[in-house]
Amino acid sequence: MNANAPILPILIPLLAALLQMISGHLRFQRAVGLLATALLVLVTGWLTLLADDGVLRVYALGDWPAPFGIVLVVDRLAAGMSLLTAVLGFLVLLYASAGFDERGVHFHPLFQFQLLGLLGAFLTGDLFNLFVFFEIMLLASYVLLAHGGGLARTRAGISYVVLNLVGSALFLIALGLIYGTLGTLNLADVARALALPGYDRSLARLAFALLIAVFALKAGLLPLSFWLPHTYTAAGAPVAALFAIMTKVGIVAILRVQAIALAPAMPDLLDNWLTTLALATVVFAALGALAAVRLRALVAWLVLLSAGTLLTTPAQASAEVSAAALYYLVQSTLAGAAFFLLAGLISEQRGKVADQFMAGPPLRATWLRIAFLVVATTAAALPPFSGFVGKVMLLTSMRDVEAGMAIWVVVLMSGFIVMATLARDGCYLIWKHKAASRPLTGDPVGWRRATATMLLIAAGPLLAIGARPLSDYSARTAAQLHAPGAYVTGVLAAGATPTGRGARP
């Protein structure tokens, strides 16, 4: 059973989507989606427990051994990101099943295909199949972005599609150059080939520079980040919440490719430029948050800011830095998703004013005020919640790196701007009301949306309480990630064995 475990997170959303397309009955699709996503949480949780023994688990599709066939690889990083995706997917789907899924057709099958693309991107051990899963993820996201209709979503969708089509074309060009230079696209075999003499080093550097540029586009690195705030602001609340993990796909891809293939053979490829652009992205996002006029736009800028902060880490090629980055990645993803869901609820409570930063009717649900304070404190990296823990871990790990001083200054200054912005804008949402205004009447929040939102918001304090075990897992994950020899040996050896077990790092 363990040998077949890596394929399960791929099969579950695929079969669920096919089953949902058999019947267009909304209740049936909801039931299938929620059951499949709950099962996905259990399976990815089990995979995470299995992966923590430090043994690579490789699934070779069609019994074709690596590097000739397609392989799925479960290590600590893949398992942990799969679990994060499944948990986020279940809570977002629970929220969307309270009525958002009624605003358009095919929401539930597309949601499962989105999960399929995300999970496949984290689990694949092959660069071409990383492209395939990227495309599955993006095709589903194109339609999910437009779910519910509206001019703003149509405009955002057009720019989003065009930019990602350009990225996909560059992705294929990069893959063609890598295959033409090294004769393989299996990541472990690519790392092996880069260690050998006889290939065109300048062409290989160009190919990997293009590949990293594509990942940076997906992650929102400046100057390729102008699409992200506009797109995430236009999307519906549950769609934007799921999109909070999409930027992390590009970041994880950069971390993996850098640690396994580039650090041993091209350690200077990311030097200077990636950290510089990442810091520029942080500044750009902080200023965008300061200028935001509505809550959903502010949250979109915060997602970009977290992506920029994380993009300062791959160039450091350090297990300590990567460990801190992984903790920060988890907490910032959950905080961003929670903030998007909360923004949707606040918008409904304030009528025509919606989530704009201006005086309006008071919030009818008192718990929304408390929820805003908790998630805003987390997003602003203030104690005692996980945002503070993650930022302290990240800055502490950067104290001895070459660009450490610049990173400290930019991250701390941007944090101060975000803190002041959230304090200013929160006053409009919580305390400033129109004279003689009363709470609007209408449908209550509902238990599904309230449960999903509160559970995601609760991640802020819970991840702070459980910071030690999570940071320990992040440290073990980073140590495994930065042991490329064990990964290469494990994948190339395990792909040819029936047990699917690789080497212990």
Image (cartoon, rainbow, N blue to C red):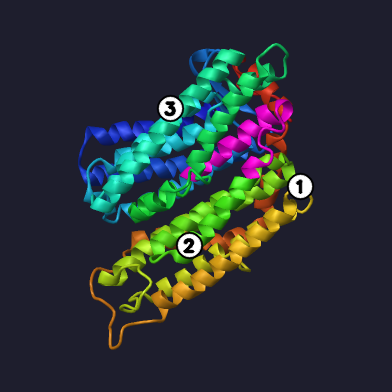
Say which element carries label 1: loop
| Magenta stretch contains residue 450 | no
Q: Earlier in the sequence, mark 3 or mark 1?
A: 3
- Which numbered tag is attached to residue 169? 3
**Spatial CA span between label 2 and label 3:** 31 Å
Q: Is residue 98 left or right of residue 287?
A: left
Q: Quadrant of the N terminus?
A: top right
Q: Amino acid at mark 3?
A: Ala
Q: Is residue 31 visible?
A: no
Q: In the depicted view, which residue is nearer to us: 125 or 99?
A: 125
| Magenta stretch contains residue 257 | yes
Residue most toward the bottom? 436
- Which numbered tag is attached to residue 402? 1
Badge 2 crowding class, 10 Å Cα cut-off, few under 14, some 14 to 19, many 20 or more, is: many
Q: Position of residue 302 (x, y in %)?
A: 50, 58
Q: Quadrant of the C terminus?
A: top right
Q: Amino acid at mark 1?
A: Glu
Q: Read off the residue under disc 2.
A: 289
Say which element carries label 2: helix
**Spatial CA span between label 1 and label 2:** 28 Å
Q: Residue at x 54, y 29 (%)?
A: 210
Q: In the depicted view, which residue is nearer to us: 349 or 16?
A: 349
Q: Is residue 55 left or right of residue 98?
A: right
Q: Which residues are magenta?
A: 246-275
**Spatial CA span between label 3 and label 1:** 34 Å
